[in-house]
Amino acid sequence: MKTLNQNLTRREFLRGIGRYSLLGLLGWLGLTLGRGLRRGKGTEYVWQIDPEKCTQCGRCATACVLSPSAVKCVHAYVVCGYCNLCGGYHQPNTKTPDTAAENQLCPTAALRRRFIEEPYYQYDVDEALCIGCAKCVKGCGSFGNGSLFLQVRHDRCANCNECAIAAQCPGEAFARVRRSRPYRLRGGVA
Amino acid sequence: METDRDKTTQVVRSAALAGAGVSGVFCLVVSVLLLVNILQLKLNDPLNAPSLVALRAQYAGQPSDESLKVQIRALDLMARRAFFASQQQLRLGGFLLLGGAGVGISLLILAGLLATAHPDPRHLPPLEAIWARRAGLRRGLKLAAGALLALALAAWIGADRDLGRYQVMTPASARAKWVPAIPVPSPAERLKNWPNFRGPDGNGVSPARNIPTRWNGKTGEGIKWKLTLPRAGFSSPIVWGKRIFLTAGDGAAREIYGVDADRGTLLWTAVVTNVPGAPGELPEVAESTGLAASTPATDGERVYAVFGTGELFCTDWEGRPVWSRFLGKPENHYGHSSSLLVVDGLLIVQFDGTSRARVLALDSRTGRTVWERERPAVSWASPICVDTGRRKELILCDSVGVESYNPANGVTWWRQDCLGGEAAPSAAYAGGLVFVASDFARASGLRLTGTGGVEVAWQWEEALPDTASLLATSQLVFMATRDRAVVCLKAKDGVRLWQQEFASQCYASPILAENRVYALDRDGVMHIFEAAEEYKPVATCPLGENAGATPAFAEGRIYIRGLRNLYGIGE
Amino acid sequence: MGLFLYLFCLSGLVQGAEPPSRFPKPEFETGYVQPLTQCPAPRAAYLEWVDVGVLAGALALTAWLAIRKRSRRGILAMTVFSILYFGFFRRGCICPVGSIQNVAASLSSTSFLLPWTVVLLFLLPLVFALFFGRVFCAAVCPLGAIQDVMIRRPVRLPRVVSGALGLIPYLALGLAILYAVTGAGFVVCRHDPFVGFFRLGGTVTMLVSGAVFLLLGIFVARPYCRFLCPYSVLLNWAARFAARPVTITPDECVNCRLCEASCPFDCILPTTPDRPPETRPVARRRLGWAVALVPAAVMLGAVAGFAMHTVFAAGHPVVRLAGRIALEERLQMREYTLESEAFRGTGQPLAQLDAEARAILARFRIGSTVMGGVLGLVVGGQLVGLALWSRRKTYEIDNGNCLSCGRCFEYCPVGRPGGKGAGQDHGN
């Protein structure tokens, strides 16, 4: 019985050493990893798309873990030219710039237009319909001012540890950005 | 009492288990339906249904077809409905699954709580088997380790250690092929037109027939129409179908014109503006070059033009801007003058300056660089792209030599340093020989060898061209020289066959059509003679206006750009 | 050099956030006011701290329930809570399992800084394991919780199988770290089988593999936790040193074997016969062989790891892209993939990509070799462990593997009232 107890205490002692050395290791790890805070940098991040790197490949519509995707087309009104014939709204080679289905580029009719004054039209994105396919982004980028572009919408995004779209983005346009500046808009709007 | 309670417990537990089973089956059914739905959505995406895409393509060709419009509208509506309905189903299915799973799991937990049966130690292996268990664990470990080693061995044998050689395509991305949005025009279609400087290949040969040989710009004889251009420029006209395109420019503005080839009316003017990154300040250029010396190019769908400012501009068929790029300020003491060429959906831009000389191939849809190569020296020549029967060769001259590239990726096929001075004449190709020349250096005939390189067949140093490009048939080579002559050499060995002097020098490059050579001199006089071993004049036709641009040829027509006017000649 | 400089300037222009302005800003005459672009804010930062707080609270509560209260029902309630909160409400992304990769990436890169919330997410379960065993696995981890409620008819796997499969978590941990360190991505998150359920959507493979694991889990208790989870390796080693892990019985063991039969994870170490069935020399020789095997196993593992490095590297997007571009160049293909077309669009020189890919390949060469060596060490060490003989007079918990689920003490007839076996006895 005595030897058994001695055995136990010895084992306990060794376990204690192991335990507290591991604890020390974890503590060191925590301090090393927490260096961001020590340097006074906010390191909480969210995912966002850099519109300048986006190649409009269309994977945002299909790769997101959410359905429909948390990536939506965003419209920077300050950049928009308010054109009647809109490269983002109309099919290329459209002869009559109207709202007829055969002339619309958006597959879900999420892009809406409204007459303002001759010859200007305002374009709005209906995010409930938008699937983030970037067709309009491509059109606006090649024919217009580039006021339409894709952004991760943070009211929908699940902020996965690894964004499933980022893993498939051919242009490496996805990046973790500071939570304090969660969007990358064109035209300098915050 | 006790047994009653036990019985009730039993009944409740069985009911809970049955309920859990039912909800399990329910979940299974819902998930199978969901999976089918997801797969269906993946396999035939209604928003990109082939029928809808085909209809849209058909409509693009026949925009006035009302029944097509109606069809597209109906199909489009259906596609959207189908898409949003399946989205709705997915969401509903998700919630049903969640609900079913919740109920099932709760019932399972309830059944677990009500369980009266104990775990039965009698099914356990006997205590003595502990040694056998350890042996099993050991075996398992060794098995796993062995399997991993075998896997590593297989990888070592199977994997190619060269970075580029193992198949790294993912199936999904392999399907996404580079398809030009608009089909690349077929060679036959290009041959029917005059899509860039010096015709279909940039080689100075026109396949057109019934080319006029008699006109007089002073009397109006043979002139179908005459159009006064708003601005001047030394670039040459190009023709596609019923459209002529030309560029003009000065310090005030750079413009692209679309002209009706039958009536000679100016259809549109595209003003080059808003080129991203263009500084607005103009480079210094020689009077004789100007800012619009480079000939534009077209692929039948869009028009591409580059200017002495370094601005590269693409418009659609109606002159609306498609994309534009600033290439950088040209470092060029006369002014940038190399013309554009479209090869299989790639826009070739020779941008040779005294520094940062390079050649770019851009995606013609977007203007993005597909490949780019540095170049050794400045030049004013233009690219030609010929099919040697074995491969396509993109041949560029510079002030040191001539280099041939693979147009698809910019890899050099061969290079020969046989030029000098200031290279402005572009190369010519015929019958397996490449002909190049530059003033104050020499002309060379280079024979393509069986190994894919070239060898010098002959060289000639007497009378040399300084502006006009070379022209070649399989037998003869023609050069319009600086000293106002046209020289004809034997293609095979470079022996001079004849030499004819004119009153004025040719800036325009000579063009071969119907086995006749058309050489336009600076006075606007077209010298037409046969492509033969001796000088046989056919006609001499004055324009009544000075000219420097190379004329464009079409079926039964010649389009000549004078200093101020564009002439349509022929019926 | 000039070309590079120029490209740099060009990209600088593109980066200048000024899109091509082909059409001038309109001058409205009707007093129209341009609307502002609306951007919904992300989830508030303090809510992340709430999550960490909930995690710490759940860990503490589970530890209390498992060790002080010894209440299987309490643990079950926590399980349900975790499925609901960490699973469905927080969509599976309060996940210490995945945080391994963030930690590895942060340790290897100076620019990848972690927020404190993620550091704590990674550390808290390990610290708890050092004191109370794997209480995180018991009822806090949503991935474990959703499998735990599926356990119905657990079978005892043959030791050959469990011994072999037990090596996979080490491999998973190695790969997770390897890919995170080389910047290839977070493979654990990418192949998480259950997160699709929590989000009510995901890729088909994700959902199918999740369903397979759940259905398999009816018979093989918690298959993901035992035979795949990379975090389980760390928790296992921390729990081996636990100060106060769960115990089967509060009192003297009566060797009834109920606990052993009740444990679906095969984590109860039974009592041993008085003497080993082998003679001492045989046992010694076995031990000697096992010890001698360790360096050989390490070497063999390192060689195998080296051999595998190109295969692993093919999972890195840059290496894949470089391979693809090289293929296109060699065959002069014009069929570009989306990736190669995007790369060509940037105008970056091919040589730079090639150099980048080769640098990554070099990191894989080292990382993969080290990983193979460590895996060899694990195999050798386990063989040594299996060659050691220790006598047990009572039923003990295998602390490293025990998930603290509480099933064993629920059935333990000894001691306190409220244990199910005891309760039945009282009833009669």
Image (cartoon, coloured by chain):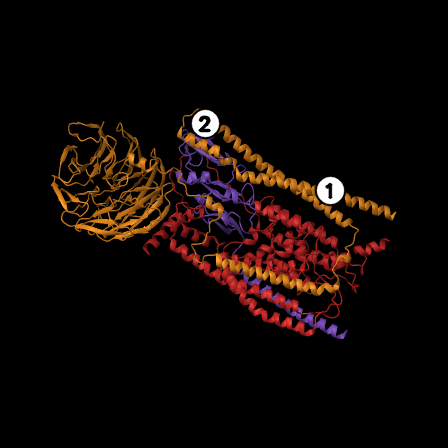
- Residue lying farthest top? B66
Q: Is residue B223 above or below residue B506?
A: above
Residue C240 placement (x, y as % from top left) = 66, 64
- Residue lying farthest front? B450
Residue at x-position 31% and y-position 43%: B311
Q: Is residue C110 visible?
A: no
Residue A38 placement (x, y as % from top left) = 53, 61
Disc 2 from disc 1: Cα separation? 54 Å
Q: Is residue B565 above or below residue B483?
A: above
Instruction: Answer left or right for B183 relative to B535.
Output: right
Chain letter, disc 2 residue: B
Chain in red on the image: C
Who is closer to the viewer here, B547 or C386?
Answer: C386
Chain B colour as displayed: orange
| Quadrant housing the N terminus of chain A | bottom right
Chain letter, disc 1 residue: B
Chain A colour as displayed: purple
Residue A106 placement (x, y as % from top left) = 48, 35
The label shown at residue B69 is 2
